[in-house]
Image (cartoon, rainbow, N blue to C red):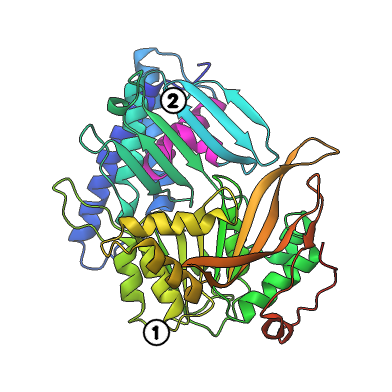
């Protein structure tokens, strides 16, 4: 048995499912039995799978079939457990802490490691149908965030049980009719600015500046391209918020995970957007959640990522009593953020004209922090770096006026102070003292 037989894994999983269902019925019929939690059931499942495996081995002996080795037996047990409670054939990749991204199209599998190295791995499935079944199982198992995935609902975006973010495209939508999926995971969970300073993402002075800006309740938008490190930086900024403050986070797909650390954020409400069902009903947008957040006594609102019309509600929240709020947005520079938000505002139900959106940004935003991957001139490796910090100063001719207070020195040098900061007195109250001359 050079590799696990998918048909055998499915057969053992089917037997396990029937036996587990019978055990559940017995417990439900017993008035003295308590209902098991999901974690308790996962632990109990190991013994059930072991019983199923023993029955299979007895059958194999009676029928004269070749028995699996002890190592293969253990792999089969783990595969059945992963099929029920994990990610099936994906589980070994998810168990590898060095892997940050997994991209699969049909039988082609590519992974990207934390250091940036990319590698192609052997196929995880024998055909497209197996991959479709795997993704459908993950979608069905994602709890309150469960999504359908079919020809009529070909796009899937879910948060997996381990916190990874999975996006999948049904083969009905791909040119070669192969299912495609991408899994992103964050290598840092409980992350702080001093850790980002230690790994070179941010300089000492910029870290001091950002820490003071958060404590001074400045509204900050973190901008960057895909996989630039926006979410990690947002987590680090959020972890500078004093624990006595009430936070409401609003996300399309849960990935911030700030509620996992009660010592840092004991009073936090986590809200997730809900997509419409197959009948087109039941959708709850980020914009609506933002409107509702103002009724839940939030000290600060954190929006995981602005991707559309909810930009208007975000700006309103930032300017209506929740100073010190945070968000991320996809952009290619700090200056582009204002154009991006104005474009999103045109998609909102209010359909604000560009001039009105710029007026709203002027009153709501304080700083834009731009992060990107920069190639190290000595090693040649790409590293995530805060490359620009821009302050909103007001408006000119109906457009936001801003100044780049920090920018990279020439040739991707260190982040340097580049312009005077107009709210310096506010930041000084929380420990920020400029240490560099403007370029």
Give the prevailing secondary structure in the magenta stretch.
helix
Is residue 413 shown left or right of residue 353?
right
Q: Which residue is mark 2?
A: 105
Residue 216 shows in the view = yes
Is residue 375 shown left or right of residue 262?
right
Q: Position of residue 163 (x, y in %)?
A: 48, 52
| Span shown in magenta | 71-94
From mark 2 to mark 1, how far is it between C-alphas? 45 Å
Q: Which mark is residue 297?
A: 1
Please say if 55 is above or below 68.
below
Which residue is pictured at 65% across the width and 75% down the height? 213
Residue 5 appears in which quarter of the rendering?
A: top left
Please say if 189 is above or below 419.
above
Residue 316 appears in which quarter of the rendering?
A: bottom left
Mark before the other along the chain sequence, 2 or 1: 2
Residue 90 lies in the magenta-colored region: yes
Residue nearer the viewer, 420 or 228:
420
Q: Farthest residue in the front direction?
A: 397
Which residue is pictured at 72% across the width and 55% down the height? 201
- Quick one: label 1, few (<14), some, or many (20+) residues within 10 Å? few
- Quick one: label 2, few (<14), some, or many (20+) residues within 10 Å? many
Q: Position of residue 331 (x, y in %)?
A: 53, 50
């Amino acid at each position: 048995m050079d590799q696990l037989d998918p048909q055998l894994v499915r057969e053992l999983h089917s037997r396990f499912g029937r036996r587990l269902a019978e055990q559940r019925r017995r417990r439900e019929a017993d008035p003295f039995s308590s209902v098991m939690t999901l974690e308790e059931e996962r632990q109990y499942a190991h013994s059930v799978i072991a019983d199923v495996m023993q029955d299979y081995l007895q059958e194999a002996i009676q029928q004269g079939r070749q028995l699996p080795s002890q190592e293969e037996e253990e792999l089969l047990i783990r595969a059945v457990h992963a099929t029920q409670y994990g990610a099936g054939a994906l589980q070994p990749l998810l168990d590898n802490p060095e892997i940050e991204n997994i991209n699969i199209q049909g039988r082609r599998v590519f992974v990207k490691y934390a250091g940036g190295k990319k590698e192609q791995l052997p196929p995880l499935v024998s055909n497209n149908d197996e991959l479709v079944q795997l993704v459908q199982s993950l979608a069905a198992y994602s709890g309150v965030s469960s999504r359908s995935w079919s020809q009529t609902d070909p796009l899937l975006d879910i948060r997996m049980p381990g916190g990874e973010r999975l996006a999948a495209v049904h083969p009905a939508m791909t040119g070669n009719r192969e299912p495609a999926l991408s899994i992103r995971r964050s290598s840092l969970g409980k992350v702080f600015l001093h850790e980002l300073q230690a790994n070179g993402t941010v300089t000492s002075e910029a870290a001091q500046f950002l820490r003071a800006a958060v404590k001074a309740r400045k509204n900050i938008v973190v901008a960057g391209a895909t996989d630039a490190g926006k979410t990690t930086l947002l987590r680090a900024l959020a972890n500078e918020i004093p624990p006595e403050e009430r936070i409401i986070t609003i996300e399309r797909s849960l990935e911030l995970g700030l509620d996992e650390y009660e010592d840092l954020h004991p009073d936090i409400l986590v809200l997730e957007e809900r997509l419409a069902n197959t009948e087109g009903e039941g959708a709850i947008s980020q914009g609506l959640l933002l409107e509702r957040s103002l009724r839940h006594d939030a000290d600060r609102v954190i929006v995981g990522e602005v991707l559309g019309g909810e930009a208007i509600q975000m700006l309103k929240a930032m300017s209506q009593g929740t100073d010190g709020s945070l968000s991320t947005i996809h952009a290619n520079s700090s200056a582009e953020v204002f154009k991006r938000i104005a474009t999103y505002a045109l998609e909102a139900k209010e359909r604000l004209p560009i001039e009105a959106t710029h007026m709203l940004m002027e009153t709501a935003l304080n700083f834009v922090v731009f992060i990107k991957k920069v190639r190290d001139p000595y090693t040649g490796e790409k590293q995530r770096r805060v490359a620009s910090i821009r302050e909103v100063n007001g408006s000119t001719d109906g457009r936001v006026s801003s100044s780049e207070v920090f920018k990279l020195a020439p040739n991707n040098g260190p982040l340097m102070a580049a312009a005077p900061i107009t709210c310096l007195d506010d930041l000084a109250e929380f420990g920020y003292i400029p240490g560099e001359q403007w370029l």
